[in-house]
Image (spheres, rainbow, N blue to C red):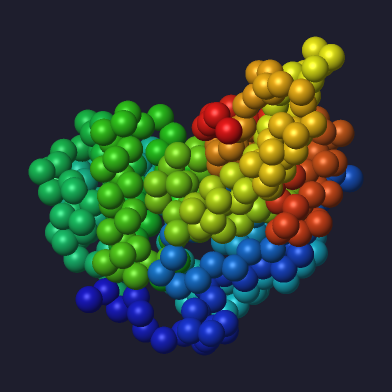
Amino acid sequence: MTGTMTSTPTTAAGSRQSVVSARDVRMSYGSTEVLQGVDLDIHRGEIFALLGPNGAGKTTTVEILEGFRQRSAGEVRVLGKDPAHADDAWRGRIGLVLQSWRDHRRWQVAELLQHFATYYPDPRDPEELLELVGLTHRARHRVDQLSGGQRRRVDVALGIIGRPELLFLDEPTTGFDPEARREFHDLVERLARDEGVTILLTTHDLAEAERLADRIAMLVNGRIRICGTPAELARRAAAQAEVRWTAPDGAPRRERTADPSRLVWELHRETDGPIADLEVRRPTLEDTYLHMVHEHTAGTAGTTDARDAADAGTADDTALVGAGTGEERSA
Ligand code: ADP
């Protein structure tokens, strides 16, 4: 076993041990507040995806959690410590997957891992590590002779060689082909399921977050708009249906409702004859995400609704859902 389950100060809520907890974290660059009160809780052994478009504040958030940036305000605990005042012992318990291969392109893969292993008190065995990341057959190759996906696996190997309890993966599969992406996802899952590593993944790719994450937090314009398991988020997105029809006077109409069959029944009672162009749509999680991203890229004015809706709490989260292009059903 890896020793990753060794005991650490417990701030458990129930039986779940908190690895990352952030409360009302704010970050300003000059007069611009790019994090506007971020709350996060990540539990031991979980794959947690921080999802958001470019510029949302993902890197800023992660660098605050890694101790590389000083936040402007808020409370942060990572592995029981404030990263702003962390020491080397704490650093040894977290793993960063950087684009390290660029600095070591002329090294042989096996030699590179053996070299890095000397930096840690209790490193993984380089041969076992090669096996784990699927690079045994490339052990004697130079790093610059590897494919993009294989280089990324070298980066992961370097990130986990010191047996971190918490691994930060920043946009891990950008530029991968589908095959490399699938292999990489398998590796990330093995690290979490078999080795108990807690993983914080940042991505702008919803499909990647849905595929890998136990829970997803959507960060848009410096705030977490919604957070939950992929299934919970999909259910919430679909909780409000959009009903469209053409009124007897020829005007297009649409209404959002949690009870579309009742709305259709009422329409039917009021309408003398069939309801023209009737459609009931259930927004998907992708609709929700794209809608929020659209608001973000449309400029700050467009974010007001999303912010208000998020502030109003869980029940109103589906208010974030715009006109869906999701599953269509006849009522
Ligand atoms: P993401 O990782 O989601 O793309 P970032 O955290 O990199 O987002 O950036 C969030 C916002 O903060 C962006 O508008 C970006 O331009 C701004 N930003 C990031 N770093 C700095 C910095 N050092 N100085 C000024 N603005 C910054």
Residue in the picture at 33% in, 47% down? 185
27 to 93, vertically: above or below:
above
State the count of labels.
Answer: 0
Q: Position of residue 101 (x, y in %)?
A: 35, 42
Residue 50 position in % (x across, y down)? 56, 51
Taking depth in this image into account, of 25 and 285 the one nearest to the observer is 285
Question: Quick one: 188 or 122, which is closer to the camera?
Answer: 188
Q: Is residue 8 left or right of residue 1?
A: right
Residue in the picture at 75% in, 38% down: 266
Locate residue 186, reporting x and y percent: 28, 49
Nearest the eye: 221 or 134: 221
The answer to whether residue 56 of the structure is visible from this angle is no
Above or below, comparing residue 147 to residue 82 in the picture: above
Toward which corner of the image does residue 311 lie, by quadrant? bottom right
Q: Quadrant of the C terminus?
A: top right
Q: Quadrant of the N terminus?
A: bottom left
Q: Residue furthest top?
A: 250
Does residue 2 appear in the picture of this structure?
Answer: yes
Question: What percent of the width, then of the height, locates residue 251?
Answer: 82, 16
112 sits left or right of 231 in the view: left
119 displayed left or right of 238:
left
Q: Closer to the camera, 232 or 132?
A: 232
**Rendered view: 74 above or below 147:** below
Which corner quadrant of the image does residue 270 belong to? Answer: top right
The residue at the far right in this view is 31
Task: Please tell me which residue is depicted at 37% across the width and 83% down the height of the picture.
Answer: 6
- Identify which residue is drawn at 55% across, 38% down: 284
